Amino acid sequence: MNRPQRVRTDPDEMRARILEVAEEYFRRVGYQKTSVADIAAELGMSPANIYRFFPSKSAINESICGRVTREIVDLAFSVARTRAPASEKLDRLLMAVHRHNKATLIKEKRTHDMVVAAMEENWPVIKAHVEQLVTIIEGVIREGVEAGEFSVDDPVETARAVKLSFLPFFHPLLIQQCIEQGEDTEANLRVQIRFILKALGAAE
Amino acid sequence: MNRPQRVRTDPDEMRARILEVAEEYFRRVGYQKTSVADIAAELGMSPANIYRFFPSKSAINESICGRVTREIVDLAFSVARTRAPASEKLDRLLMAVHRHNKATLIKEKRTHDMVVAAMEENWPVIKAHVEQLVTIIEGVIREGVEAGEFSVDDPVETARAVKLSFLPFFHPLLIQQCIEQGEDTEANLRVQIRFILKALGAAE
C-alpha cells in the first residue's frame, strides 16, 4: 500500500498531474478565469502546495504552451525531413504549420487564449519556439541553395525574412482577424508562398 | 450677434466640434474610458444631441481614425509621386509608413488605443485604408515593370504579397510587440525590403 503513495508524491509525477488538471481547467473555464486556487481545489491540495512546483499560474501556462509549441516544431521537422525538392518542402511546411495553427488556435478557442496569454507573459517560450521554426526554415533554404534550386546570399537573414512574410499566417491574432473577415487564408497563403519562393530565386 | 450663433449650429461645424472635443478627450483619458456622456458634458450639451450627429462612440472614432489613416495614405502618395526608380520609391515608401506608424501609434499611446478599437469595431475603415495602401504599392510595382526594373506577372497579386510581407512593420500590435522586445524594427525592415525587392525581380 505504500508504493502508490510514494509515486503520487514524486515531484515529476506531481508536476505532470498539476499540468494535466490545469490544462483541462484552462480549456474548460478559460485561462483568464482560472486561478491557482481553482487548480489546487481540483487536485484536493492547498495553493501553497502548487507553488512548491510552479511559482505562478503563468509558469504553469508556460509548461503547457511549451508542449503545444513542441507539436508545431515536430510537424515542421516531419515535413523538412522528407525527400523532396526544397521549394516543395518549404511550400508544404508553411501550409502545414498554418493549417495546424488555424485548427488548434482558432477552433480550440481556449488554447488560443492560453497562447495569447503566453505571448504576453512568457515571451521567451514563444520566442524560442519561433527561433526553432526559423532554424528549420533555414535548413530547407540551405538544402535548396546546395541543390542549385535557390539563389540566396545569406540563409540566416533570408530565413528571418521568410518568417516575417509568413507571420500573417502564423500569428494567432492575425489568423483570427483574417478568419473573422471571412478571408480564405489558405488561398492567400498559396499566393504568399509563390512570392516567397520568387524571393528565394526558385524557378517558377 | 446672430451670425456666430448660426455658424455654431451648422451641422458640419457641429460635427467638427464633436470630433475635436472627442479626440482631445480620447487622447487625454483613453478611448475605452470615455463615454458619449463625457463628450457631451465637455461640449455643454446632452448625449441625445451628440447622437443626432453620430449614432455611437464607435462612429465618432471611425471619423477620427479616418483622418489618422488619411495621413498615412497622403504620406505614401507623396513618396510614390516623386521621380526615382521604382525600387527606391518602394523602399522609401515602406520605411516612411513604418516610421510614421511607429511614431504615431506607439509614442502616442492613446492614438494607438483608438486605432486598435477601430480595428475591432470599424473594420471597414481599416480595410479601406489598407486597400488604398495596396493600390499605391501596386502603382509603384507597375511603374517598375514598365521601366524594366521589376519582373512581375500579376501586379495586383504581388502588391498584396508585398503588403503581407510588410504587415509586421505596419500592424500596430505587431510593431508594439517588436518594440517591447527591444528589437530594432528599422534594421529588420531593411532586410525585409531587400527580400521583397528580390521577389519583385529587382537587380541587387
Image (cartoon, coloured by chain):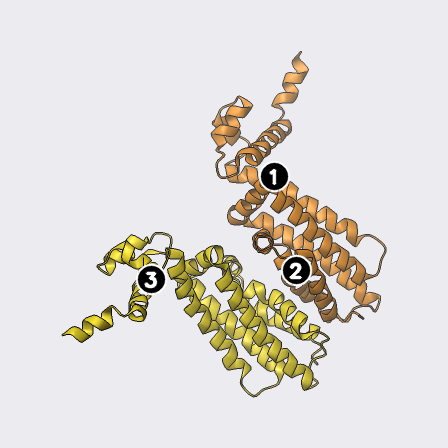
Chain colours: A yellow, B orange
Residue A94, compared with residue B25, is above or below; it is below
Query: Which amino acid, by three-letter code, is at mark 3?
Result: Phe
Q: CA distance from mark 1 to mark 2?
A: 24 Å
Quadrant, the N terminus of chain B: top right
Asked if the residue at tag 2 contacts the one at tag 1, i.e. Cβ–Cβ closer than 8 Å, the answer is no
Residue at 53% over, 64% down: A127
Q: Is residue A110 in view? A: no
Identity of the residue furthest to the bottom in this view: A83
Quick check: do tags 1 and 3 share a chain? Answer: no
Judging from the image, mark 1 belongs to the subunit labelled: B
* Secondary structure of the residue carrying numbered label 1: helix
Question: Would you identify the image quadrant in which residue B22 lies?
Answer: top right
Residue B117 rendering spot, x and y as whole percentages: 53, 45
User: Which chain does the residue under circle 3 lie in?
Assistant: A
The label shown at residue A155 is none
What residue is shown with label 1? Answer: B64
Kind of residue sitting beneath label 2: Phe
C-alpha separation, residue under disc 1 versus residue under disc 3: 50 Å
Q: Is residue B101 left or right of residue B34?
A: right
